[in-house]
């Protein structure tokens, strides 16, 4: 993106720019997400089918005249399968999202990373991404438990935490603090743009699931149902994950343009000059602990006497 064209964007313009970047980098984004999400979704389906408990796993049905003992081996296998599925999904989501951020940010940073490069970049940040996601989830969850409103506020204030981690290499609490600093004063607009993106992504996901609904529930073959569900999840993630990442990335750069003159900095770097320093927005009085200096005109000239009075 030409630095000279960067300017503060409205919510509608944020979505419009995100869609344009999404369309321009669509093939790369699809490859980066599908390579990760596809195999994981298929493996998840196989784990779900193999770990699916039989009717006797949790004990005897109420209407059965025969009393049987629960098979705790199958029960533990079922729980382990659910845990594996959840962990694989969590890791795949972090990698796919980070790879999408890498591709989309190239539109601003005058780069066009391929899907292989984007995945390598995402994998190099995986530990930090997982820690940030865990920290954000726990703190936002506590905020919701406290009074709902703090959770909603923190969710919006930390929208830019992942771009901060990936593009500025600030991790953990530093990424959260930096995101909150950028969002400060733009919370409502930021949440509005993100909410619009989430709604659009949910509509696409619902349409894809509806198309495969008949296949999933048409028969009693559990394997076919699991594979169909895996295909629906893969298609939905491939289409919606890059779009959501594009919106968050555009929000991040828009906040930097508004607050830090990122357009001027980027333009200066591209023409090979030193970026201008950002002028302080609030100049206060000198520190109170600094020793006071002499008044103007001091010391007085020789022969000076204070006036009578």
Image (cartoon, helix red, strand yellow):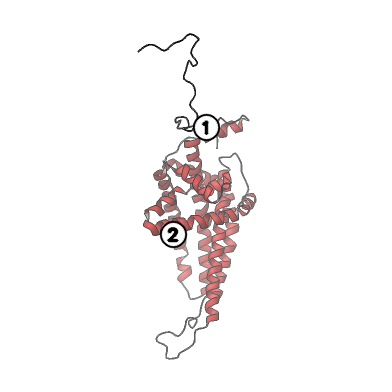
Q: Which of the two residues, 286 or 109, is positioned nearer the viewer here?
A: 286
The kind of secondary structure element at disc 2 is helix
Residue 188 location in percent, x, y? 39, 45
Name the residue rendered at 54%, 58% in the picture. 93
Name the residue rendered at 58%, 67% in the picture. 43
Direction left: furthest residue: 309
Q: On residue 262, which mark appears?
A: none
Q: Vertically, is 221 above or below 104?
A: below
Name the residue rendered at 41%, 12% in the picture. 306
Name the residue rendered at 47%, 74% in the picture. 219
Name the N-terminal-most of marks 2 and 1.
2
Q: Vertically, is 276 above or below 236?
A: above
The kind of secondary structure element at disc 1 is loop
Residue 175 location in percent, x, y? 53, 48
Residue 6 location in percent, x, y? 50, 35
Going by the image, does 258 lie left or right of 147?
Answer: right
Q: Which of the two residues, 299 or 149, is positioned nearer the viewer here?
A: 299
Residue 190 location in percent, x, y? 43, 45
Quadrant location of the C terminus in the rendered image: top left
Q: Vertically, is 132 above or below 84?
A: above
Q: Which of the two residues, 307 or 97, is positioned nearer the viewer here?
A: 307
Residue tagged 2: 206
Quadrant location of the N terminus in the rendered image: top right
Residue tagged 1: 278
User: Callout 1: 10 Å neighbours few (<14), some, many (20+)?
Assistant: few
The part of the image, by quadrant, that contains residue 129 is bottom right
Camera-near label (2 vs 1) is: 1
Label 2 and label 1: CA atoms lie apart by 45 Å
Q: Say if residue 16 shows up in the picture.
A: no
């Amino acid at each position: 993106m030409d630095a000279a064209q960067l300017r503060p964007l409205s919510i509608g313009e944020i979505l419009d720019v995100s869609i344009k970047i999404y369309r321009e980098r669509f093939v790369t984004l699809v490859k980066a997400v599908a390579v990760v999400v596809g195999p994981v979704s298929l493996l998840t389906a196989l784990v779900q089918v193999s770990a699916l408990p039989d009717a006797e796993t949790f004990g005897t049905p109420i209407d059965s005249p025969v009393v049987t003992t629960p098979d705790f081996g199958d029960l533990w296998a079922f729980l382990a399968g659910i845990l594996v599925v959840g962990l694989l999904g969590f890791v795949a989501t972090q990698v796919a999202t980070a790879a999408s951020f890498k591709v989309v940010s190239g539109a601003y940073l005058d780069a066009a990373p391929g899907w292989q490069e984007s995945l390598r970049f995402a994998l190099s940040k995986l530990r930090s991404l997982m820690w940030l996601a865990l920290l954000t989830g726990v703190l936002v969850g506590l905020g919701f438990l406290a009074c709902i409103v703090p959770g909603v506020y923190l969710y919006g204030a930390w929208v830019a935490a992942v771009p901060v981690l990936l593009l500025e290499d600030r991790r953990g609490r530093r990424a959260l603090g930096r995101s909150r600093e950028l969002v400060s004063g733009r919370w409502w607009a930021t949440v509005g743009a993100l909410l619009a993106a989430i709604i659009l992504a949910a509509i696409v996901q619902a349409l894809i699931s509806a198309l495969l609904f008949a296949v999933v529930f048409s028969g009693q073959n559990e394997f076919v149902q699991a594979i169909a569900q895996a295909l629906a999840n893969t298609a939905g993630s491939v289409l919606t994950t890059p779009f959501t990442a594009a919106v968050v990335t555009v929000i991040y750069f828009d906040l930097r343009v508004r607050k830090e003159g990122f357009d001027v900095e980027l333009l200066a770097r591209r023409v090979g000059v030193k970026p201008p320093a950002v002028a302080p927005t609030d100049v206060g009085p000198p520190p109170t602990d600094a020793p006071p200096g002499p008044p103007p005109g001091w010391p007085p000239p020789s022969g000076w006497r204070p006036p009578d009075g």
